[in-house]
Image: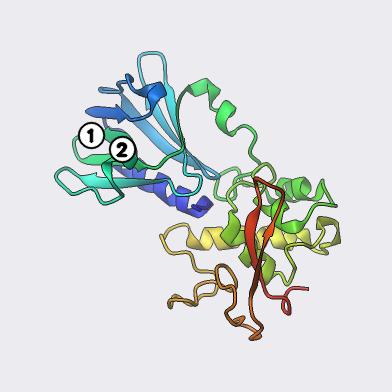
Amino acid sequence: MPEGDTVWLAGRRLHDALSGRPLLRSDFRVPQLATTDLTGRIVTEVVSRGKHLLLRIDGDNDPLTLHTHFRMDGSWHLYRHGDAWRGGPQWQVRVLLENAEWQAVGYRLPVVELLARDHESDAVGHLGPDILGADWDPVEAVRRVAADPDRELGPALIDQRNLAGIGNLYKCEVCFLSGLSPWTRVGDVRDLAAVVDRSARLLEANKATARQVTTGDTRRGKTSWVFERAGAPCLRCGTRVRRADQGDPPRQRVTYWCPRCQT
């Protein structure tokens, strides 16, 4: 699943390719927008908000925002004119935006909607402080997580209403680096601010690259401490990494942890 740093990087690349340029073509391959044409409009900026992407588009007194969400496996790809599209088969394309230099192609996007600019909050107003946003507020993020002391730490960290951007990978890795079981009660965490700060530092360290590394080791199989390493020896103590579902259906997530390093 794409996490906040993945979406941030996609937003930066789309902004560099699209902003300030008029659209020569738009093609929406979702039923609700099938007849929409943005030709001639100018993309003013592309910004991420947690795991959401907002493409702001000017128009004749009706500025719009194209809101997309990656969910499990959505993605945006950029191609020069004439390049082969390599993001997947054509039937997986949901959006095409084209200017004189670039083609921006959205694949497998489960959320594609056009909003009036002043209705952006309908899509992202529920989110907590954005770890990679200009308005990042760690104190408010800690307050929101701490507001439910009986909740397990893992689900609390990936609740986008608490802080926006953390996904399953960083949840598992932050809990490992904090020496805490993901099933620890929030109220039993001695230094919640340190956990939130560690989360922010991991996303910040990885936001400018497509590779997500939490160990400092870029070798294959060594990039994460516990995430997707079930059955493998812990890189710190050698104990076998375990995995189990955590959370209530349908929002449960596969969680990885070391039973020795994480009390």
**Residue 183 circle label:** none
Rendered residue at 55%/58% (across/down): 203
Q: Is residue 125 above or below residue 259?
A: above
Q: Residue 135 placed where, x, y %?
A: 60, 42
Q: Do tag 1 and tag 2 residues touch (Cβ < 8 Å)?
A: yes
Rendered residue at 73%/45% (across/down): 140
Horizontal side, residue 233 vs residue 30: left or right: right
Which residue is denoted by mark 2 in the rendering?
A: 18
Q: Residue 121 placed where, x, y %?
A: 58, 28
Q: Is residue 23 something one can see in this rendering?
A: no
Q: Is residue 216 above or below residue 6?
A: below
Q: Is residue 42 above or below residue 152?
A: above
Q: Is residue 90 above or below residue 5?
A: above
Q: Residues within 10 Å of mark 2 (few under 14, many from 20)?
A: many
Q: Quadrant of the C terminus?
A: bottom right
The secondary structure type at the circle numbered 1 is loop
Which residue is denoted by mark 1 in the rendering?
A: 99
Q: Residue 243 placed where, x, y %?
A: 64, 68
Horizontal side, residue 111 vs residue 192: left or right: left
Q: Residue 226 placed where, x, y %?
A: 60, 72
Horizontal side, residue 257 vs residue 22: left or right: right
Residue type, numbered disc 1: Asn
Q: Residues within 10 Å of mark 1 (few under 14, many from 20)?
A: many
Residue type, numbered disc 2: Leu
